[in-house]
Image (spheres, helix red, strand yellow):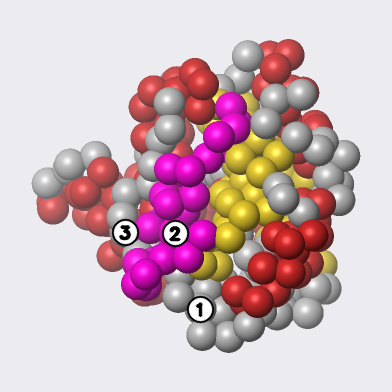
Amino acid sequence: MTKVSIITPTYNAERTIASCIESVIAQTYQDWEMLITDDCSQDATIQIVERYAAADSRVRLIRLDQNGGAGAARNRSIAEAEGRYVAFLDADDRWLPAKLERQVSFMQQSGAKVCYSSYVTCDAVGNVKGIVPCPKRVAYSDILSDDRMGCLTLIYDAEALGKVFMPLMRRRQDWALKILLLQQCGEAYGIPDTLAIYRVSDGSLSNGGKSSLVKYNVAVYREVLHYSSVKAWLTFLFRFMPHYLYKRLVLMMVNNY
C-alpha cells in the first residue's frame, strides 16, 4: 500500500469530529495518517481527538497557537504530511468505507495526479438531502469558471506535484488550491461513485452564505491569478456566475428540489 495523508482542520467541532474520525478508521484502505490541526477550539474538540489519537497512532493532533482559519490549519497538516497522496476531510463531513481504496486504485491504474468523486449532502442531523454528481474530467480552463470538485473527495499526488498548499484566505481557499493543482497537471479526473457525505450546517468551515462569499470568489481571481480588479469582477460576473447558476439548476433537477 501507499500512505494517504488526510488533512482535517477543526474548530469547535465537538458534535461531529467523532463520526468524522470513525469514518476514516472504517476505511477498507488502511495505510493512512489523519493529521487533525485544531484552530484554537473552545469546546471539547481537543479532548475527543486526543482519545482517538491515544487509541490509534495513525490519528495525530496538531494545535495552532492562534486562530488562523481553515486554510492555515490545513496547511499545517500538509506541512507535516508523510504520505504520497494528500486527501481532505473537514471535521463535519464523513467518508464512505470504500472511498480511499476506490480512489487510490484509480489513481495508481490511470496515473491521474488529481482525483475527486461524487458525494451526497446531509443536514445538520445527518438526513440525506441529495447527491452532487461529479464530471468525469475537469481541465484547468474549467476550474477557472467554477469549483467543480468537492474538497471532501479531493486527493492529489504529492510525489508527482510536490506539496501544494492553500492560499491563506479565510474562505474559498479550497477552490484556490484546486486552481493551483490544475495549473501544474492540467486536468483532474472524477469517479462517479458517491464516496463521501457533506454536512450542510451553519458551523461548516466552508459555509458562509452565498452573498458573503462573492468577495472571496473575486479575491481568488485577484490574489491567486493576479487579475486586475476590473478583470476579476468581469470574470466573476460573466464567467463564474453563469456556470454557478447552471450547476445549481442541474442539482435541482437531479435531486427534485
Measured as percent of width and height from the top left, residue 64 is found at: 41, 66
Q: Quadrant of residue 212?
A: bottom left
Between the C-alphas of marks 3 and 2, the distance is 11 Å
Q: Nearer the viewer, residue 148 or 124?
A: 124
* Circle 3 or circle 2, nearest the eye: 2
**Residue 117 visible (yes or no):** no
What's the amino acid at mark 1? Answer: Ser
Which residue is painted at 78% across and 45% down in the image?
Answer: 195
According to the picture, the residue beneath numbered tag 3 turns out to be: 169
Residue 132 vertical position relative to residue 67 in the rendered view, above or below: above
120 horizontally vs 226: left or right: right
> Which residue is at 87% across, 39% downward?
28
Which residue is located at x 51 percent, y 27 percent?
158
- The residue lying toward the viewer, choosing from 55 and 195, is 55
**Residues rendered magenta in the picture:** 62-86
Q: Is residue 153 left or right of residue 159?
A: right
Q: Position of residue 106 (x, y in %)?
A: 74, 23
Q: Which residue is mark 2?
A: 73
Q: What is the spatial separation of the Cα atoms under label 1 and label 2, in whole angstroms?
A: 12 Å
Which residue does the image show at 73% across and 14% down from the upper left? Answer: 109
The disc, 3 or 2, on the residue closer to the chain's N-terminal end is: 2
Query: Badge 3: few (under 14), some or many (20 or more) residues near its Cα, within 10 Å?
Result: some
Amino acid at the residue labelled 2 = Ala
Asked if residue 128 is among those painted magenta in the image, a careful observer would answer no
Residue 49 sits in quarter: bottom right
Residue holding disc 1? 41
Image height of 29 relative to 204, above or below: above
Which circle's residue, 1 or 2, is located before the other in the chain?
1
Q: Are marks 3 and 2 in contact (CB under 8 Å)?
A: no
